[in-house]
Image (cartoon, grey):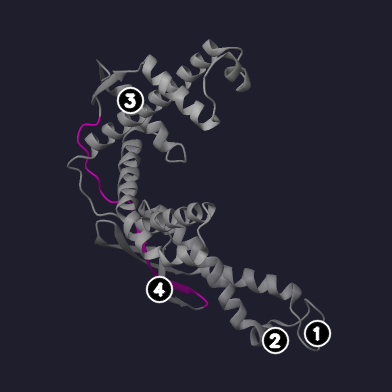
Amino acid sequence: MKTEVKKLDSSKCEINVAVSGELVKNKFEEVFTQIAKEAKVPGFRPGKAPRDVLEKHYAGVVHEQVLKELVPDVYNQAIAAEKLDVIALPQIADVKLDRSNLTFKAIVEVTPEIVLKDYKQQKINFKTTAISSEEIKRQLDTLKESRKVEVVDDKFSRALGYPNLIALEKAVERQLLTTKENQERQRIENTLIENIMQGVEFKLPQGLVERQTQDMLRQTKLDLAMKGLPRDKIEEQEKMILENIAPEAKKQVKVYLVLAQIAKQEGIAIDDQMPAKVMEFLLGQASWSESLAK
């Protein structure tokens, strides 16, 4: 197999692939053998038709099947041989196949070169989390209004599944504390990512951006449908939805690629858990300091 890689830009390559000899010949023989077992040719029992008759009736079918099986196999071998980090399905073109030769061109999107600044020892200024009595009171008032009662007392607390008002207040405090802690964790992660990405520029792979945009579009339309918005109204808003989500889609792709680059440099597996694992690594490497929450 011969391969030639041309870099079209920072995130796209053209691979020219040529294969000849026994690999192609053997694939043709393999496919002919498969078809011969079940081929229905007038005047012959299944599997008994001579090769020249099979050639006459099934040459086109065999040719298509060889392409279907051989091109993906050869393409994957070429990607592995060239050690390309492909991130999208290829565009296959200029395919030529005869009984002993296969050539084709593949346009592929690859992970762009990303040069990161030092992402370790990032400074994190975290805020201590506490719940005031006033916050608890406001939450209880909200409960009172939603339940349309005049007073929050032990009777009201028991109706919500708590033995008395003190137990309800503690439960409310725990819920508020959990919410605040989650918000603080999210703030820290967002700040950490923004600091790492500051000044890091590279061309985003358009195929990846398009897939992320379409995923977000489908989710937005589903959310609107769940809220009861008619389908025709949702379709009318599609252009506006796309305009609104496009910047966020690009940002999410950029964040993912930056995290993936860190993962590669730190030996972290690129899988569904990669973003969370990289964030854990970054938080563990960071320099933390505490300040009181306002």
Image position of 140 with respect to 258: above or below: above
In front: label 4 or label 2 = 4
Query: Label 3 amino acid?
Result: Leu
Magenta-colored span: 99-119
Q: Is residue 230 in the magenta section?
A: no
Q: Position of residue 255 (x, y in %)?
A: 31, 43
Image position of 159 with respect to 91: above or below: above
Report the residue marked by disc 4: 93
Q: Which of marks 2 and 4 precedes in the sequence?
A: 2
- Picture residue at 77% right of the left edge, 76% below the top: 47
In front: label 2 or label 3 = 3
Q: Are marks 1 and 3 in contact (CB under 8 Å)?
A: no
Q: Are marks 2 and 1 in contact (CB under 8 Å)?
A: yes
Image position of 138 with respect to 250: above or below: above
Q: Position of residue 172 (x, y in %)?
A: 48, 20
Mark 3, secondary structure of its residue: helix
- Picture residue at 47% right of the left edge, 22% below the top: 140
Q: CA separation, marks 4 and 3? A: 45 Å
Q: Which of marks 3 and 1 precedes in the sequence?
A: 1
Are there few (<14), some (14-19), or many (20+) residues within 10 Å of tag 1?
few
Most extreme residue toward the left is 199
In front: label 4 or label 3 = 3
Report the residue marked by disc 1: 44
